[in-house]
């Protein structure tokens, strides 16, 4: 099974054929939901090392335990690489980060219930394997060279490609962990407004969720080293995109941009690398090794673009470190309050409306290190983040009041100015040299 939004093999020959992919995904407001994905960083409890795929502490064994409980195992090359349970997927990232793509929910409290069930199952399976799961956005133990690669074909292609376009792509693949939220849109105008809002506040989200200050077992002066890694992973497909602030025809603008981003591969019963620099526009015109572009190829290509806000059949919020379980659960209601309430969305967008794109780019470059202290016009990102959380809370109170309390952990960070990164640094210094104590201190409750 191929874990991409599957389409029939419908040929595409022009940009107009691709626009329908986005426009057909629109939903009426009463069908809007929010999905959450998060990646957890595992360690072998006895040593702090990264679990390999094979062996008694292996990620393969963990997937087998989940498959034995329920769901359909997805195989590739003789290895289980994912478990599908209805609208829920459990997958693995290149360095063994364990990802839950939870089912989209209309009520954020359902995500909490789903995560409680998932973490209980993960704890039981991991305990028998001697694996613990850490709270944070970057693997703190060892170096990149110490991390085993997971056996997925697409990662083999990306592993060869990444060093040709940036200096930190392999770090991104192997070491980082994120939490993402996925949101629906009604039509192009609604998608444009939501994307503009998201890009207006993405650096605030990075600062609020920062949780990756430890690199190579040393405390750094970074709040989100994960976000810093993304600054030089692949500038052609990551970061900020200016047309979000310039154009209302977001489906056309995003399509034009995506058409000219080089492809990684096509999928025909396996991943086939394409020549370096081949764009989807060229592939659509000329084909490749006898294959012709299809909507399935387009969906796959869109999944290999990594901007701060990604447009597919929904909008992905991509700027946040994974952190504590309450913070994972807070992102969904935070974004619901900001993007699904029109008043809140307008107010949030206005927070940075006077900034030029060059200023936004500077902020995005500085916030991984400076966090809340980053200057943004006449304010700091910390001051704007405090206002952002208030706006989101007000918006959520209007459309989903029962979920407001889920914002408490992110509100506490915004109000106090003390981030998860600050706490992680303090814990690291307190237990420096004692790896067992560090694992206990940094692990999620129940998953240590």
Image (cartoon, helix red, strand yellow):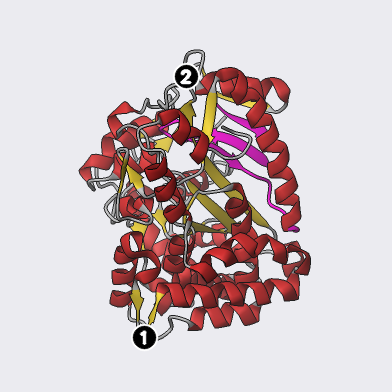
Residue at 69% x, 20% y is: 68
Q: Position of residue 197 (x, y in %)?
A: 51, 74
Assign the N terminus to one quadrant of the image.
top right
| Residue 131 highlighted magenta (yes or no) | no
Is residue 19 or residue 340 the one in the foreground?
340
Query: Circle 1 — which element?
Result: loop
Assign the C terminus to one quadrant of the image.
top right
| Residue occupied by mark 2 | 77
Residue at 47% x, 21% y is: 46
Q: Is residue 29 visible?
A: yes
Of callouts 1 and 2, which one flags the residue occurring earlier in the amino acid sequence?
2
Are the residues at dot 1 and dot 2 in contact (C-beta closer than 8 Å)? no
Q: Is residue 80 visible?
A: no
Is residue 13 toward the left or the right of residue 406 in the image? left
| Residue occupied by mark 1 | 378
Is residue 302 or residue 448 the one in the foreground?
448
Q: Position of residue 402 (x, y in %)?
A: 78, 65
Rendered position, 352 above or below 156 = below
Q: Position of residue 247 (x, y in %)?
A: 43, 77
| Residue 82 highlighted magenta (yes or no) | yes
- How far apart are labels 1 and 2 at the CA level? 55 Å
Q: Please name which of the two marks, 1 or 2, marks the residue nearer to the observer.
A: 1
The disc placed on residue 21 is none
The part of the chain drawn in magenta is 81-107
């Amino acid at each position: 099974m191929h874990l991409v939004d599957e389409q029939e093999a419908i040929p595409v020959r022009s940009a107009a054929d691709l626009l329908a992919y986005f426009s057909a995904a629109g939903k009426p407001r009463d069908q809007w939901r929010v999905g959450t994905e998060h990646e957890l960083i595992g360690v072998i409890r006895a040593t702090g090392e990264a679990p390999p795929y094979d062996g008694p502490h292996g990620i393969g064994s963990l997937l087998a335990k989940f498959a034995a409980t329920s769901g359909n195992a997805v195989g590739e090359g003789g290895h289980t690489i994912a478990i599908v349970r209805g609208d829920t997927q459990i997958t693995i990232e290149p360095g063994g980060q364990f990802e839950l793509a939870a089912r989209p929910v209309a009520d954020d409290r359902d995500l909490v219930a789903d995560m409680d069930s998932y973490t209980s199952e993960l704890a039981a399976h991991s305990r028998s394997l001697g694996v613990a799961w850490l709270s944070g956005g970057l693997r703190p133990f060892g170096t990149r060279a110490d991390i085993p690669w997971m056996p997925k074909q697409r990662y083999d292609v990306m592993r060869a490609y990444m060093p040709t376009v940036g200096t930190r792509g392999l770090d991104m693949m192997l070491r980082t962990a994120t939490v993402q939220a996925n949101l629906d849109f009604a039509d192009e105008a609604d998608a444009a407004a939501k994307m503009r809002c998201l890009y207006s506040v993405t650096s605030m989200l990075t600062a609020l969720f920062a949780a990756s200050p430890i690199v190579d077992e040393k405390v750094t002066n970074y709040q989100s080293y994960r976000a810093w890694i993304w600054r030089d992973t692949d500038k052609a497909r990551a970061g900020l995109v200016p047309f979000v602030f310039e154009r209302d025809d977001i489906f056309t603008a995003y399509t034009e941009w995506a058409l000219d981003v080089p492809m990684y591969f096509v999928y025909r019963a396996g991943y086939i690398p394409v020549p370096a620099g081949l764009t989807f526009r060229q592939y659509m015109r000329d084909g490749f090794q006898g294959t012709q572009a299809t909507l399935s190829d387009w969906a796959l290509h869109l999944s290999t673009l990594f901007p701060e806000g990604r447009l597919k059949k929904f909008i992905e919020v991509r700027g946040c470190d994974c952190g504590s379980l309450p913070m994972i659960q807070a992102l969904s209601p935070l974004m619901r309050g900001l993007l699904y309430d029109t008043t809140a969305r307008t107010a949030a967008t206005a927070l940075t409306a006077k900034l030029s794109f060059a200023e936004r780019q500077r902020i995005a470059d500085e916030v991984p290190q400076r966090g809340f202290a980053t200057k943004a016009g006449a304010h700091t990102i910390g001051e704007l983040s405090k206002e952002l959380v208030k706006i989101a809370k007000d918006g959520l109170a209007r459309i989903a009041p029962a979920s407001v309390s889920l914002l408490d952990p992110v509100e506490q960070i915004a109000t106090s100015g003390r981030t998860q990164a600050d706490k992680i640094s303090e814990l690291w210094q307190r237990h420096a040299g004692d790896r067992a104590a560090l694992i206990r201190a940094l692990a999620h409750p129940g998953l240590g």
